[in-house]
Amino acid sequence: MYLSLRDLLFARGRFALVGGAVALVTLLLVLLTGLTEGLGRQNTSGLERLEAARIVLDAPADGSGEASFTDSAVTAEQTRTWARTAGAPAVERLGAAQTRAEAGGSAAAVAVLALEEDTGLAPGLRALEGRSRPGPGQAVLSATVAEDLGVGPGDTVRLSSAALRVAGVTEDVHHSHLPVVWAAVADLPAIAHLGGDAAATALALPAAGDPPDAQATAAADAAAGTVTTDTRGAFAALPAYASERGSLLTMQGFLYGISALVVVSFLTVWTLQRTRDVAVLRALGASRGYLLRDALAQAAAVLVLGALAGALAGGLTGLAAGTAVPFATGPATVLLPALGVVVLGGAGALLATRRVSSVDPLLALGGN
């Protein structure tokens, strides 16, 4: 590594430039990854908190099979048919709606998740004040909603045409980017203005039960006219979830490609400039393997230092911005992007520096 270290010390400006470019790309990737994860949690944490083994939605009328929480309306007959066909008495009605919460002259946009009174869903929901489960005529607010409305246990909030007493305040949970208010499914018609014979938005099977197998599930769906999926599959039924996440992941892919391109371009030019120095080493007896390892060590030093600097800056920026934007900070959002830059940059460096193994030692003597 003698030559590579000498180059790093001699051409500090050039290597600082490419290291800065790697750090900047890593910074952007960390920020974008944290934002993607944060937005995803703000979209799906309500469904994840339910810990349901299966979620059942009303099948779309066009037969596309792409169910949506916005359009889904499960009837009482579908509920009975599904439970009877699947042999799952633990099927629970689940409500999901977006509305406006009002109290004492204050208002906030909220998402309502309505549960059965004796529900087995959301077993890990933690109450900060009062109860974590609402009964009929009651609501349990996420901390953000309680703070925005300035209410607590015992106060009254209005959700659409329903006036509900606050039974408790829980940790923040979000559904479709809105803070969640937990309510009783008995109050859902007044909150969501359900029409016709609709009884709920969806059905859910708690994870604590024994969910039916694939054959029984398919039979229940066919008989009831529903679509069944697991919790992760239900994310696709959230408005704009797939397009939002797909756009952000595409941007991440472009940034990873740019990071590899930056490294390849720099090291290709640098390798060409080092051709005579490498030829001298070859004339002195250095092996091709030694020269290749030397060049790769140089590339690795630039990549690792640049990626670490970018990851550190991204993590600190994320911590500072986490109170203003939905940003998730953790090993998966900070270290994995940095590792990805190093791996892709290393692959690009291997392509860019392989020329050193074929340098003619006659160049050291001025040969052609």
Image (spheres, rainbow, N blue to C red):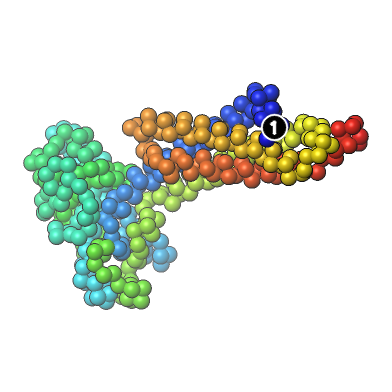
Quick one: which residue is furthest to the left in this view?
A: 154
Amino acid type of the residue tagged 1 in the rendering: Tyr
Can residue 110 be spotted in the picture? no
The image quarter containing residue 346 is top right
Residue 257 pos. (x, y %): 60, 43
* Label tally: 1
Between 65 and 15, the residue placed more toward the observer is 15
Quadrant the C terminus occupies: top right
Residue 289 pos. (x, y %): 73, 45
The image quarter containing residue 214 is bottom left
Quick one: which residue is furthest to the front in this view?
A: 285
Q: Residues within 10 Å of mark 1 (few under 14, many from 20)?
A: few
Residue at image position (66%, 28%) is: 8
Mark 1 highlights which residue? 2
Between 133 and 307, the residue placed more toward the observer is 307
37 horizontally vs 212: left or right: right
Residue 269 pos. (x, y %): 73, 33
343 horizontally vs 74: left or right: right
Residue at image position (41%, 49%) is: 240
Residue at image position (56%, 41%) is: 341
363 horizontally vs 43: left or right: right
Q: Secondary structure at mark 1?
A: helix
The image quarter containing residue 365 is top right
Residue at image position (14%, 58%) is: 117
294 horizontally vs 55: left or right: right
Q: Is residue 158 above or below residue 8?
A: below
Quick one: which residue is furthest to the right in this view?
A: 367
Residue 335 pos. (x, y %): 47, 41
Q: Is residue 238 above or below residue 356?
A: below
Quadrant the N terminus occupies: top right
Can residue 268 be spotted in the picture? yes
